[in-house]
Image (tube, rainbow, N blue to C red):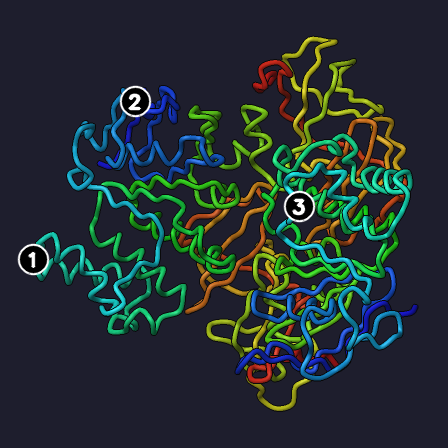
Amino acid sequence: MSSTIVTTGIGKSFGDVQALRDLDLDVPEGAFFVLLGPSGAGKTTTLRVIAGLEKPDYGTVHLTGIDATEATPAERDLAMVFQSYALYPKQTAADNIASPLRARRLSKADVDERVLQVARLLHIEHLLQRKPGQMSGGEQQRVALGRALVREPRAFLMDEPLTNLDLKLRVEMRTELTRIHRSLGRTFLYVTNDQVEAMSMADQVAVLHNGAIQQVGPPTEIYDRPANRWVGTFVGWPRMNLLPCTANGQLSGNGWQLPNPGFAVDGDRPALLGVRAEDMSLDVRDESAALAGTVYAVEPLGDRTLVDIEIADQRIVVKAPPTASLRIGESVRASVDLDRVHLFDADGEAAIPRR
Amino acid sequence: MGEVRVERLHKAFPDGTVAVHELDLTIADGELFVMLGPSGCGKTTTLRCIAGLETETSGRIVIGDEVVSGLRPSQRDIAMVFQFYALYPHLSVHDNMSFPLRAAGHPAAEIAERVNEAARLLRLEPLMKRKPNKLSGGEQQRVALGRAIVRHPKAFLMDEPLTNLDAELRADMRAELKHVQQRLHTTMVYVTHDQTEAMALGHRIAIMNQGRLEQVGAPMEVYERPATLFAASFIGSPPMNLIDAEVTNGHLTAAGGLALTAPEGLERGERVVAGVRPERFVVSASDDDPGAARGRVVSREALGDETIYVVETEAGLLNVRMPPTVRLAEDQPVAVRYQGTAPPVYDPESGRVTGR
């Protein structure tokens, strides 16, 4: 597959702050590619460098195989969608959507036809004659999206477009965006700090932290095989439990011990055991792979119950069925699915592979 | 005793808006009671009336066995927590925690005892000499909680105290609050717009909408059997599926032949709205069950520990929660089947739960 966007060794500093360091990205044609990271990770800077709004200190940007590092934003033929909708308040939705086409000297019939196509795709035909003030936030966001779609650019760059919407709308818009991406078949490069958005929409996720790529892969791979401690705890909710331990033939921590399920360590290695809440169970079948502690808090969420367990001086969270009934202070055992645990180096924090 | 009673509380503002309509609530001694609703539902106004920060238009507030209407906030023996954090930066953890007691003129021995007790409960002992800027966010939160605890109030009133924290701290602090409240057994009234927080924390949840009560119940009760369509759509993510259905021969039948277990106490031919949680549906590539609805996957969200499918059927778009091991593709033809006991059903006119 050819690549729509390739950045090679991008570096960018603002004063003393190094925002990006040697950033390599390869966004395949037609992908829904998500750049995921906390605020300050360098996501927006990356997007702005690709769009040509920011000049990198070093490194190159290639668009569909052509070096575009020196190209103006307009020459790059990319459409940006931001979290603020920035619609023209005095124009109707139809005029807002049509605005990028004005410079193109298309006939009115062609413009109308194109606007209608986009409106159909976004399910906003009924809003075309309204002005932004007469629309909800979600509707305005769709119009803003329509204005980007109408151009048929090389790729769409989206900077946290759902951030200002309420939870319910955000969930709906996630579904919408995946559907729109599929029917367009165009490249989407989407920036977010919300790991649920990344998990639910992306074909490929690049996790960014401190201006550097931590891991690139399909969402399930990032979730199931995090490359380091940082990715492991950033992706997934509740947060992955981390237990300091010494790894050798066993994994031994403060107040617990588990067999080493095949992590490649020589001698005694200080490490962090990573276990997701759903990879433990209060229904203990295998006594040798269980952690013992006391119940710290019980949090029913409806479809599941989170049980906080205190083990010596640490707390872990276990996902239990909604029927679980436990009391604070009760002794409890949690069995661990050893096939699904992670081990991270205590210093470098990289994932330690299995033999 | 820290029972809190809200009796026919009515609050109208000078501009004529009615924030709370004739509200009755009884919050038991030692209960962690959550008031949940969208902004403008009246939950914060109710809390502020309990605290004495607003004066009720009519009705009254009883804390313990004392009618507190008309008393100033400081006379009500309650601790109000707006949001944790606001620590005095120049004071140590110990001094931050003892401050409210010193200000109230308690004897030194008693102050020491209460502060030590709170420090033990919150595992702050090793940090007592530090200044706030030497603490992590979570530690600062625990100190702020400690400062409320040392006062031994009849009740804690909390207004979205976790809202400004990042997701990770919020989850930690939620468990901390629940643990501490249960240990102290002090009544806590907690206001939030976040349904996850409400479910996780509350012994009981009151769902409010437009100044009125929609439902009061234990978290699982509210989750399993929302009393109104409003409560049904407010609790749970993805939200409950609300499906138009008709009572037929022993079933509830929706468009496209989707069959649901019928509750008792309904007439044949009656039209209702059934409320089905996403985990009560099963989606599969094919299904011979005659009560399954045929459809097409519109979207799949693989969230790691679960996958949410949105399936387009004649009965509408259905949200289905499945384990991550099930792999169905977008656009794939599928079948959705209901499993389990009867779902709650609603009168389409009144929006209230009906049947048994």
Which comes before the other along the chain, label 2 or label 1? Answer: 2
Q: In the figure, is residue A215 to the left or right of A268?
A: right
Within 10 Å of the Cα at label 2, are there few (<14), some (14-19), or many (20+) other Cα atoms?
A: some
- Residue situated in front as seen by the camera: A301 or A9: A9
* Residue at the image position 71 percent from the left and 73 percent from the top: A215
In this picture, is B345 found above or below A210?
above
* Residue at the image position 56 percent from the left and 82 percent from the top: A346
Give the spatial CA distance, label 3 vs label 1.
63 Å
Classify mark 3: helix, strand or loop.
Answer: loop
Q: Position of residue B151 (x, y in %)?
A: 20, 51
Q: Chain of mark 2?
A: B
**Three-letter code for the amino acid on which mark 1 is drawn:** Pro
Q: Is residue B284 visible?
A: no
According to the picture, the residue beneath numbered tag 2 turns out to be B7
Q: Are marks 3 and 1 on the same chain?
A: no
Q: Report which quarter residue A352 is drawn in.
A: bottom right
According to the picture, the residue beneath numbered tag 1 turns out to be B107
Q: Report which quarter residue A208 is drawn in.
A: bottom right
Q: Nearer the viewer, mark 3 or mark 1?
A: 3
According to the picture, the residue beneath numbered tag 3 turns out to be A87
Q: How many marks?
A: 3
In this picture, is A66 found above or below A81?
below
CB within 8 Å, label 2 to label 1: no
